[in-house]
Image (spheres, rainbow, N blue to C red):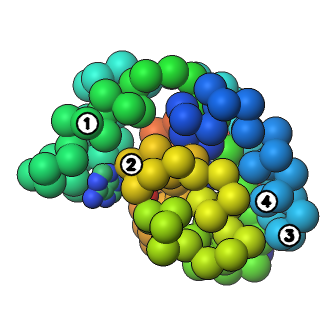
């Protein structure tokens, strides 16, 4: 078993789809190991997405990710990083496979309902970004 970080993004929280997305992830075999609702400020969102800071969509992405509450969630499964990326589908919901979270719940390439870590190394860093030691005791 391994861990990954998912983030139910502000579009999905605002439109009342967070519960359906969590249910979808559990039905797909993930176990929720830690979860919170929080809100990012501009500095925090910029730091989280710093790998994209030269991209043309960076400012818009930061504006979107600070627009409302979001729900980071630590998920456990066999090969959790790769499995979650499969289950959420392509970045752009128009290109996502049927049955994936983004096909079912995302609005657009930017407002795409959910984030997932892209490597075990980034999963560890992203979990530590949102969850403190006492919240991850026992993971
Ligand atoms: P995520 O998987 O969280 O990683 C980076 C995010 O940037 C991505 O989901 C989208 O929300 C956003 N993104 C990526 N590419 C684009 C794009 N071409 N235009 C707008 N937003 C994008």
Callouts 1 and 2 close, C-beta under 8 Å: yes
Q: CA distance from mark 3 to mark 4?
A: 7 Å
Does dot 2 land on a helix, a strand or a loop? Answer: loop
Instruction: Give the total number of marks visible in the rendering.
Output: 4
Which callout, 1 or 3, points to the residue nearer the camera? 1
Would you identify the image quadrant in which residue 100 lies?
Answer: bottom right
**Sequence-first disc among 1 and 4:** 4
Tell me whether the residue at label 2 lies in contact with that at label 4, contact meaning CB atoms closer than 8 angstroms: no
Q: Secondary structure at mark 3?
A: loop
Q: In this figure, which residue is indicated by the disc labeled 2?
A: 110
> Circle 1 — which element?
helix
The residue beneath circle 4 is 25
**Disc 1 from disc 2: Cα separation:** 8 Å
Question: Tag 2: Cα neighbours inside 10 Å, few (<14), some, or many (≥20)?
Answer: some
Quarter of image, res 71 = top right
How packed mark 3 is, by other alpha carbons closer than 10 Å (few <14, some 14-19, many 20 or more), is: some
Instruction: State the image coordinates of residue 119 (x, y, percent, origin top left).
Output: 46, 71
Residue pictured at 67% horizontal, 45% vertical: 73
Q: Looking at the image, is 26 positioned above or below residue 99?
A: above
Residue of label 3: 29
**Label 2 CB less than 8 angstroms from ligand 1:** yes
Q: Quadrant of residue 5?
A: bottom right
Residue 135 percent across, percent down from the top left: 70, 34
| Crowd band around label 4 with a 10 angstrom C-alpha radius: few (<14), some (14–19), many (20+) | many
């Amino acid at each position: 078993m391994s861990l990954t970080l998912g983030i139910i993004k502000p579009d999905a929280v605002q439109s009342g789809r967070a519960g359906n997305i969590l249910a979808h992830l559990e039905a797909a075999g993930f176990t929720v190991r830690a979860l919170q609702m929080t809100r990012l400020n501009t500095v925090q969102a910029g730091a989280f997405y710093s790998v994209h800071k030269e991209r043309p969509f960076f400012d818009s992405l930061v504006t979107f990710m600070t627009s409302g509450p979001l729900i980071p969630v630590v998920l456990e499964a066999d090969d959790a990083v790769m499995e979650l990326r499969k289950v959420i589908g392509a970045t752009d919901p128009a290109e996502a496979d049927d049955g994936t979270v983004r096909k079912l719940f995302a609005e657009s390439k930017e407002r795409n309902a959910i984030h997932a870590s892209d490597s075990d190394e980034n999963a560890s860093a992203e979990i530590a970004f949102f969850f403190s030691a006492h919240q991850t005791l026992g993971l």
